[in-house]
Image (tube, helix red, strand yellow):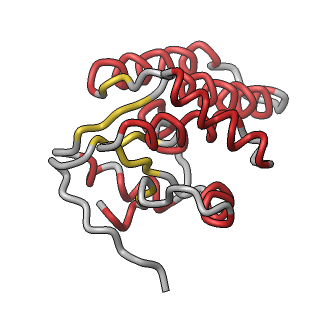
Amino acid sequence: MKRRVNVNKRDYKILLDTSFLLPFIGFRTDEAVMNSIEKLRGCRVYFSEISILEALWKIVKKIREASSGEGYSDKNHVVEAVIEGVRVIRRDFNKAEITEKAVREAVKLYLLGHRDLVDNILYGIAVTQGDMRFLTIDEKLKDFVKSRNLETRVFIEPADL
């Protein structure tokens, strides 16, 4: 049974995993993510520029896959929607800086065997802030951190909002 975390929206800064930025850029994602977007109202929400980069990697891959088929002619519309989404994220959310301490945590996770450096950096940002929680549905990351007896209280899930 999963432990439910009591989160007071005003007590914590909430760092969004990349999957939570995708809906703001116009891309549907996991249902749990989509259902949690409205619950973020009233929260102190943070993003990292590295998540925007990762989101763009995912988006251009989808655009490339879609454009290889017939009938995909409105790439400019998609590009403009993505740019507007990035504007919204930067306007409405707070920017979480990648500090030296966060990099140290990220490299530590990498050396322990977790190879997703973007996730490692996001975890590092949240865990070194003290009052920040990392909103993610990434079970592989959470399981890895738990298996290494590292800080897990930093994680929250959509159900915790």
In the image, residue 55 lies at what x, y percent? 59, 30
Q: In percent of the image, x 75 and y 47: which residue is there?
A: 114
In the image, residue 81 lies at what x, y percent? 48, 21
Residue 106 sits in quarter: top right
Number of residue marks: 0
Q: In percent of the image, x 18 and y 49: which residue is there?
A: 11
Q: In percent of the image, x 61 and y 64: which residue is there?
A: 146
Residue that lies at the very extreme toward the bottom in this rendered image? 1
Q: Nearer the viewer, residue 87 or 103?
A: 103
Vertical comparison of 15 with 94: above or below: below
Q: Nearer the viewer, residue 81 or 147?
A: 147
| In this rendering, position of residue 34 left or right of residue 28 | left
In the image, residue 40 lies at what x, y percent? 27, 48
**Screen quadrant of the C terminus:** bottom left
| In this rendering, position of residue 107 left or right of residue 65 | left
| In this rendering, position of residue 148 left or right of residue 99 | right
In the image, residue 103 lies at what x, y percent? 59, 27
Q: Nearer the viewer, residue 55 or 99?
A: 99
Residue 15 sits in quarter: top left
Q: In percent of the image, x 42 and y 60: which residue is there?
A: 153
Vertical comparison of 93 with 23: above or below: above
Q: Nearer the viewer, residue 92 or 45?
A: 45
